[in-house]
């Protein structure tokens, strides 16, 4: 396992390695105070890992509930966001309780933004299950939803309390979704890491996942620590995003 520590407006750890899902309960307990936890996930990911995550949290004494929405970028909208806030209120989560974002970028963005607003802010744990979320969106505290006028137009900077990246979850990713995450890895290689760039040129996408994710996260951590609120340097991390969003559209 590799650990990267972020020291920005908040200090938190990013843990990367195999088999980490089973340690979630212990890790959440170590954050202190919480009694209830709501797992936020989507219809692709929750059937794969929801049971394992719930069992781990139950074993550490938490009362666990979940909010699962249909998978897809189109769900990252105000309606899903409000349904999530209402569900958290019905579950009677308090300010000391926790959310767990179990999934890719859409889940992380929705759960993170809800965490920033619910009761004026509660803590959350990111569990990225896509390569894109592991190397980019789960780190740095940018959260958002899309509005009819455009992507990510409403959101907040709200850092997680912990990022737990279990590399085993990448095994169930469809290959096109894994390749799409590789674009973010290539981004870090172009911006910061000629050695990684050469590895990618030689071996393509067959790289050691734990060490490449940890390497990318370290680059991102360094940028976030210098420009957490995206006033200049952090904009570099959008390299390729405009054309990516165009292709996506
Ligand atoms: N995804 C780019 C950033 O976090 O700034």
Image: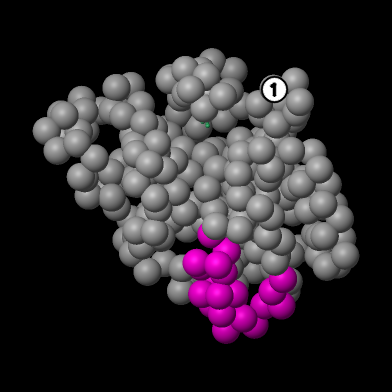
Query: Relative to residue 216, is residue 225 drawn left or right?
Result: right
Query: Relative to residue 135, is residue 201 drawn left or right?
Result: left
Counting the numbered discs, the total is 1
Q: Residue 232's quadrant in the figure?
A: top right
Residue 176 rendering spot, x and y as whole percentages:
38, 41
Badge 1 marks a residue whose secondary structure is strand
Q: Give the quarter of the figure containing the C terminus.
A: top right
Residue 243 appears in view: yes
Q: Which residue sits at x=88%, y=65%?
A: 90
Asked if the beta carbon under badge 1 is closer than 8 A to the nearest atom of ligand 1, the reply is no
Q: Is residue 133 magenta?
A: no
Q: Which residues are magenta?
A: 45-65
Query: Relative to residue 97, is residue 109 drawn left or right?
Result: left
Q: Which residue is mark 1?
A: 150
Q: Residue 100's quadrant in the figure?
A: bottom right
Q: Which residue sits at x=24%, y=40%?
A: 205
Q: Residue 66's quadrant in the figure?
A: bottom right
Q: Is residue 57 magenta?
A: yes
Q: Nearer the viewer, residue 198 or 141?
A: 198
Q: Which residue sits at x=61%, y=56%?
A: 42
Residue 115 rendering spot, x and y as whole percentages:
73, 50
Residue 122 vertical position relative to residue 197 in the rendered view, above or below? below
Residue 18 rendering spot, x and y as whole percentages:
33, 64
Q: Residues within 10 Å of mark 1 (few under 14, many from 20)?
A: few
């Amino acid at each position: 396992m590799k650990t990267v520590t972020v020291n920005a407006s908040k200090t938190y750890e990013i843990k990367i390695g195999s088999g980490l899902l089973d340690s979630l309960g212990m890790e959440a307990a170590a954050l202190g105070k919480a009694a209830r936890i709501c797992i936020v996930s989507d219809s692709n990911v929750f059937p794969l890992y929801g049971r394992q995550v719930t069992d781990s949290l139950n074993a550490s004494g938490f009362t666990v509930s979940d909010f699962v929405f249909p998978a897809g970028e189109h769900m990252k909208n105000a309606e899903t966001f409000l349904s999530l806030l209402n569900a958290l209120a019905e579950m009677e989560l308090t300010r000391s309780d926790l959310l767990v974002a179990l999934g890719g970028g859409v889940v992380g963005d929705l759960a993170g933004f809800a965490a920033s607003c619910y009761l004026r802010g509660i803590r959350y744990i990111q569990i990225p299950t896509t390569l894109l979320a592991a190397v980019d969106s789960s780190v740095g505290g940018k959260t958002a939803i899309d509005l009819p006028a455009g992507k990510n137009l409403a959101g907040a900077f709200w850092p997680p309390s912990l990022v737990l990246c279990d590399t085993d979850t990448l095994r169930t990713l469809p290959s096109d979704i894994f390749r799409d995450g590789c674009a973010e890895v290539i981004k870090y290689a172009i911006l910061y890491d000629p050695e990684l760039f050469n590895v990618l040129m030689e071996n393509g996408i067959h790289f050691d996942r734990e060490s490449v994710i940890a390497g990318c996260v370290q680059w991102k951590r360094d940028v976030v620590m210098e420009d957490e609120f995206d006033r200049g340097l952090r904009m570099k991390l959008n390299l390729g995003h405009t054309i990516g969003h165009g292709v996506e559209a």
